[in-house]
Amino acid sequence: MTKTAACPVSPRPGLLRRKRREIAKNWDAYLFTAPFYLIFFVFTVLPVLISIVLSFTYYNILQPPTFIGLQNYFNLFLNDETFLIAFKNTMLIALITGPIGYLASFLFAWFINELNPKLRAVMVVVFYAPSISGNVYMVWSILFSGDAYGYINAFLMNFGIIHQPVQWLTDPQTMLPVVILVMLWMSLGSGFLAFVAGLQTVDRSMYEAGYVEGIRNRWQELWYITLPSMKPQLLFGAVMSITSSFSAGDVTTALCGFPSTDYAAHTMLNHLNDYGNIRFEMGYACAIATLLFIMMVGCNQIIQRLLRKVGT
Amino acid sequence: MAAKAVSLKSRLKRRPYGRSRVGNLLNFLVLAGVGVVMALPMVYAVSSAFKPLDELFLFPPRFLVRQPTWDNFSDLFRLMSFSWVPFTRYMFNTLLLAVLATAGNVVVCSMAAYMLEKRKFPGSGLMYHSVVLALMFSGAVTAIPNYLIMAEIGWIDTYFALIVPAFATPIGLFLMKQFMGVVHDSLIESAKLDGANEWQIFWRIVMPIVRPAWQTLIIFSFQSTWNMTGGTFIFSEELKTLPSALNQVLQGGIARTGVSCAVALLIMIIPIAVFIASESQVLETMGSSGIKE
């Protein structure tokens, strides 16, 4: 800034020249980052841009896209009842599995951190395994099987809680709760790992100082010392859990089939795949993708703002 | 490490301040209870894979296996040896993909991460923020335009479509960049004074220091390539991967119940085994994974 102030006649050319010189000086930095950003641009940034552009068109792959303005968005919200169900389900799943999964990730990471190191290592595997075990969640469809010998039914009937078997995966009333339960079971993912690791990097001397200052139990220790010093991990965990809770879709298809009874477990991702892979209405599918994209990023921004207030 | 071990030992002997015995017991009971629920489906999957046919179709079903047998696994191998494309080909495909994608992912992400962490240059802020933004949405959202781009480049039904996008993952760059914060700038400066160029500094000095980070990235990368089915990009049978072959077995219906239990176990066990083998490194890296403001 001092340099531009020194030549008040034409600050802009000076700024430009300085920028150009800076770029030329850092040519090797651009060389190092080029492979990543070239691929990142073509396969991540460009698809998002294309998706946004195509969402304003009618496009069926065979004919060139025609511009139809906001028609796709109007249709989604005004003419497509299935989409409204999918929208409601996605919001419901995200609003329940997102925060609960996030809190559970942190709480269990914290509980596990109180154990001795050997037991801790075992428990981390037990809690983390469901999220990396491929499609083992299929097992839940056996546990929730609809006849009297399905494990959950048999268990509940034994204790007299229910008197006849519940059709867990085909009854519109119970499908969504079961899906949410299974997603919660899988929700201790990379955010959970970040928490477990972050808890171990908190500076020990902070705790000692805290006890001198009058902190009495582990709850106070958590709120006044641990949480504020783990803000970066908390942010990372939030991003991970929001992203996965909004992209629910595989689990619903695996458990309740596609389409599910009365679309009761239909999510936006299911709807997107329906129009993208089956009906080939790409413009419409891209409008759904754009909405999902906006929801994920928007929700992340809100959470980031909220998390800045932790411990202050 | 030694100091850490000593402090842990002394912590074990003497109850830390602010920890009541009742609280510790309660903590353990809660963890044990929830842990059992978490592990139950896993236990069921393992137990089913070893069930003989009569136990699989037993009615009412039994949760645990009584007479374990390897029959399901030998059936799987027999079935696979009759398949049109030999089983070993699927295995080779998955290994090839995993090795190439993982190696590329580590090198490409580390190179970019090194410059973003250690140097400020025009555009570096934008580069970092775009990656953090990309962390926020899943790849499922961009599947359609991705297919259109692949078709345009002509990579449909080639491995490029699976490998090249896997090189530049937002989470890879993010993890490497956060962990490279531990490398002291003075180390890099002194290497520069000794006449090392950027590539030598990156490859000979920085990469060995951040070893836990790229070992973690190898594991994450492996986990995603292990589950890679080829999706909409690959349609030639001889190019398909192990998971997609195994998924075909799963669709074999009621007659293949036993075999599909064995398949489910195989798909599940490998990522978990890899994680167990590398747990301490992964935790070390994830400790520095936070998003700084």
Image (cartoon, grey):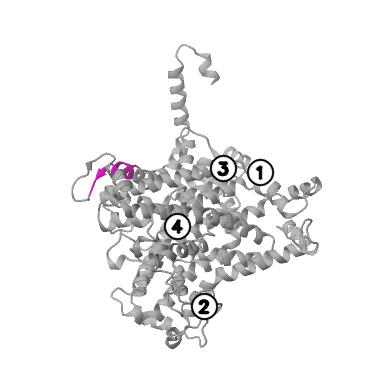
What is the CA distance from the residue labelled 4 to the residue labelled 2?
A: 49 Å
Give the farthest residue toward the left: A63
Taking the magenta stretch, the answer to whether it contains residue B177 is no
Residue B102 shows which numbered tag? 4
Q: Residues within 10 Å of mark 1 (few under 14, many from 20)?
A: some
Q: Secondary structure at mark 3?
A: helix
Q: Secondary structure at mark 1?
A: loop
Q: Which residue is mark 1?
A: A311
Residue B112 is at least partly visible in this image = no
Residue A306 shows which numbered tag? 3
Q: Nearer the viewer, mark 1 or mark 2?
A: 2
Q: Residues within 10 Å of mark 4 (few under 14, many from 20)?
A: many
Q: Position of residue A202 (x, y in %)?
A: 68, 50
Of mark 3 and mark 2, the one earlier in the sequence is 2
Amino acid bearing label 2: Met
Q: Which residue is mark 2?
A: A157
Going by the image, does A263 lie left or right of B151? right
Give the residue at x 58% y 62%.
Answer: B279
**Are callouts 1 and 4 both on one chain?**
no
Residue bounds of the magenta highlight: A49-59
Please tell me in which quadrant of the rendered image residue B14 appears: bottom right
Q: Secondary structure at mark 2?
A: helix
